[in-house]
Amino acid sequence: MLVMLVCNQLNRSNIGYAQEHLQADVGIGAAAYGFGAGLFFIAYAIFELPSNVMMEKLGARAWLTRIMVSWGFVSFLMSFVQNETMFYVLRFLLGAA
């Protein structure tokens, strides 16, 4: 559980550090960055209850493993962001994961 909390904090910190580089390299401005950050929390709010129901059905070990694998994969894909739309989609998927 501690490892998952550390990974969560690293993800939140990394996207903050990446804002400057996203603006310089990809052209994602402050408004687009803010919208993408908001999409993460919207997806999280939508999928939080169904995720807890699935964890109850499948067991915590299996479900938390699924969360970590999908979260890691989407975080990895964030390194290939090329435009605002891709940034939005990946932030939404990260929230859903």
Image (cartoon, rainbow, N blue to C red):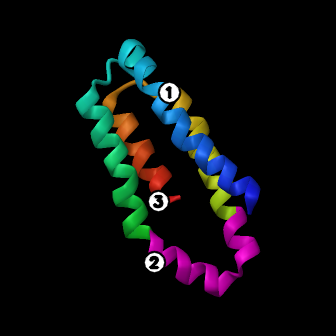
Look at mark 1 in the image and give the residue it sits on: 17
Q: CA distance from mark 1 to mark 3?
A: 22 Å
- Please rate how many residues cluster around mark 2, counting C-alpha atoms within 10 Å: few if below 14, some from 14 to 19, many from 20: few
Label 2 amino acid?
A: Leu
Disc 2: which residue: 49
N-terminal label among 2 and 3: 2
x, y percentage for residue 5? 66, 55
Magenta-highlighted residues: 48-65
Magenta span: helix, strand or loop, mainly? helix
Picture disc at residue 97: none
Structural distance between the alpha carbons of marks 2 and 3: 11 Å
Among numbered discs 1 and 3, the one appearing first in the sequence:
1
On screen, 94 above or below 46?
Answer: above
Q: Nearer the viewer, residue 57 or 36?
A: 36
User: Total label count?
Assistant: 3
* Callout 2: SS: helix
- On the image, the x and y values in percent for residue 61 come to 76, 73
Q: Mark 1 falls on what kind of element?
A: helix
Circles 1 and 3: CB distance less than 8 Å? no
Find disc 3 in the rendering and name its residue.
Answer: 96
Residue placed at 55% from the left, 28% from the top?
79
Amino acid identity at mark 3? Ala
Farthest residue to the bottom: give it: 57
Is residue 25 in the magenta section?
Answer: no
Between marks 1 and 2, how big is the CA–CA gap?
Answer: 30 Å
